[in-house]
Image (spheres, rainbow, N blue to C red):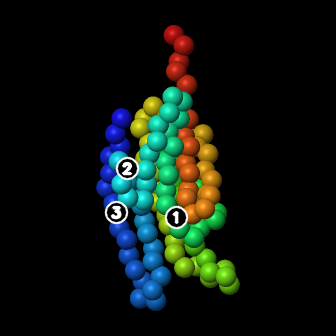
Amino acid sequence: MSASSSRESTSAAGDGTFKVEIKQYGGGKGPVRYFFDEDSCIARVDVPGCSGFTSVPLEKTNVGFRTEEVDENNNPLRTYSGFVKFPTVYDPKNAELKVDSGVLWVTVPRKQRRQG
């Protein structure tokens, strides 16, 4: 299974801070990597220096997020925001997100098959 990829934008403000917006990215390269197992899809998003996140509800196939790296005085250094797109066989409404050592892990379960 392959994932589509397109990087939207990376911009630097005049004061040296960075804002990275990841709209979609996948395929084993760059800041987002996908892993698949029998009953879920896991996206790994590199967010160096971040320890928390805000989940943003989006469309049927996307999980949105926002996280910030802050300095020792709690001043924002970098902001990461965007969404991770999942294949339609997965259920983003039941996604689980966690940040561990500068990595945002987004685990999305496979949709339940209808018994027919």
Could you tell me if the residues under marks 2 and 1 are in contact, i.e. CB atoms within 8 Å? no
Q: Residues within 10 Å of mark 2 (few under 14, many from 20)?
A: some
Give the residue type that dot 3 points to. Answer: Glu
Residue at image point 50% right, 52% down: 44
Q: Residue at x 54, y 13 (%)?
A: 115
Residue 7 % position (x, y): 33, 60
Q: Is 102 drawn above or below residue 14 in the view shown?
A: above
Q: Which is closer to the viewer, label 2 or label 3? A: 2
Residue 31 point in image, percent of width and height: 42, 59
Asked whether the viewer can see residue 92, the reply is no
Q: Nearer the viewer, mark 2 or mark 1?
A: 2
Q: Image height check: is 36 above or below 68?
A: above
Q: How many marks?
A: 3
Question: Label 1's element?
Answer: loop
Element at label 2: loop
Residue in view at x 32 percent, y 51 percent: 5
Q: What residue does disc 3 label?
A: 8
Check if mark 2's residue and mark 3's residue have beta carbons within 8 Å. no
Residue 111 % position (x, y):
53, 29
Residue highlighted by disc 1: 47
Between 100 and 95, the one nearer to me in the picture: 100
Q: Amino acid at mark 1?
A: Val
The percent position of residue 92, horizontal first and vertical second, equals: 53, 41
Residue corresponding to mark 2: 28
SS of the residue under disc 3: loop
**In-image side of 94 versus 44 (left or right):** right
Say which quadrant the N terminus sits in. Answer: top left
Alpha carbon distance from label 2 to label 3: 17 Å
Q: Earlier in the sequence, mark 2 or mark 3?
A: 3
